[in-house]
Amino acid sequence: MLYDFRSFVNPGAYAFGKGTFNHLGELVERRHENSDSWTVFIVDDYFKGKSLIERLPKKDNDLLIWIDTVDEPKTTLVNQYRDEILAHNTKLPSVIVGIGGGTTMDYAKSVGLMVTNPGDSAEYQGLDLIKNKGIYTICIPTISGTGAEVSMTAVLSGPEKKLGIKCDYTIPNEIIFDPELLATVPDEQRFYTGMDCYIHNIESLSGTWVSTLGQVFAEKSVELCREVFLDSNLSRIDADEKLMAASLTGGNSITYSQVGVCHALSYGLSHVLGVHHGVGNCVAFNQLEEYYPEGYKEFKKMQEVQGVAIPTGITANCTEEQFDQMVETAWALEHMWDNAFGKEWRNHITKAKIKELFRRM
Ligand code: NAD
Ligand code: ZN
């Protein structure tokens, strides 16, 4: 274990169920102390021109920031959005609302912190580097699986590394889980992000850091993933409600354990080749039968039932330098290797082996 004791923070309040999004206005109002209190809405730009925007409780003095999800969150854009917020009003906002997937929620979480912590967000990538608590943040997932809505991390790509801002304040204050918001997610993307959740659980359950609490959350989450991705009799809305619960419990599981080999490799793919997290996890997990034999078998079954193809050959044209960069990115994630193999993890995996795994992808 890299740290021996920690009292983990969980989100303060959840609203769960169909139609809960309709109550966003009430939740925002509760946090407004004065008539000039205002809100920042950070929204996935998929929703531009969609009916969800008309349902936003947005007032004249509020600010709406659109998130382009082509790239995963970058420290440079976090800084830019923070500056936009500070320029919008001399008073700080009372609430930040993040509406979207892991990308948008991680922007909401990190921007909410950077409004009250000076400097470049890249300086805060790491554990417990944030000094001041951020703006009250409400996260509203519109695609489920990452667990970003309940996690203590906001994962960012900086000039040097892909690493989360992780501390007690990174946790969202409140979450609205409304499965109706997931209705438009395309099947392929739903599978990739859903497998992020499944893999969180497999890595948590087979890791050396797992505690009874982490295990309980992961076991329930795996059970829900099986219902969602293997039971074809579920209606889409029922499956989406279960997927939201799976994401929540899977995310909680990671809080009380850690991810492993697949995530370390996926971070390498993402940092060097820009591969998105869910896809990267699937591409990596597709080569990890020797480390996660049972999980691998079930993953392949889910893939078959869902009829989704996992990309192959994505490293076929990589240069030796790119392979080395991917290996170094993955190798630096000590906590993941430590969880996967224990303190003596260097006896179980080598840079040569990691490179060979990347070559197969
Ligand atoms: P995402 O947020 O990037 O969204 C994926 C795609 O789905 C986008 O094109 C988006 O526009 C679209 N989309 C979202 N909601 C939709 C809807 N309702 N209808 C139609 N399309 C919709 O994907 P993701 O997999 O949720 O998040 C990935 C990110 O999450 C990565 O940046 C990863 O690093 C991060 N992550 C964070 C944590 C954490 O603990 N903070 C954990 C895992 C992953
Ligand atoms: Zn993940």
Image: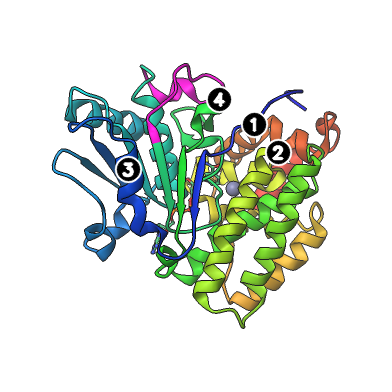
- Examine the rendered structure and indicate whether residue 88 appears above or below residue 297: above
Q: Which residue is mark 2?
A: 256
Residue 311 in view, yes or no: no
Q: Which residue is mark 1?
A: 8
Residue 15 lies, in percent from the top left, at: 48, 52
Instruction: Let me know if residue 121 is in the magenta part.
Output: yes
Question: Which class describes the residues within 10 Å of circle 3: few (<14), some (14-19), or many (20+)?
Answer: many
Secondary structure state at the residue bearing disc 3: helix
Residue 11 lies, in percent from the top left, at: 53, 39
Quadrant position of residue 6: top right
Q: N-terminal of the two: label 2 or label 1?
A: 1
Instruction: Let me know if residue 35 is in the magenta part.
Output: no
Which mark, by number, is residue 28? 3
Q: N-terminal of the two: label 3 or label 4?
A: 3
Q: Which residue is mark 4?
A: 126
Badge nearest the viewer, 4 or 1 = 1
Residue 81 lies, in percent from the top left, at: 29, 34
- Residue under the point 36% across and 45% down: 27
Question: Is residue 71 left or right of 333 when viewed as pictured?
Answer: left
Ligand 1 lies under 8 Å from the Cβ of mark 4: no
Tell me which amino acid carries mark 1.
Phe
What is the C-alpha distance between the residues marked 3 and 2? Answer: 30 Å
Badge nearest the viewer, 3 or 1 = 3
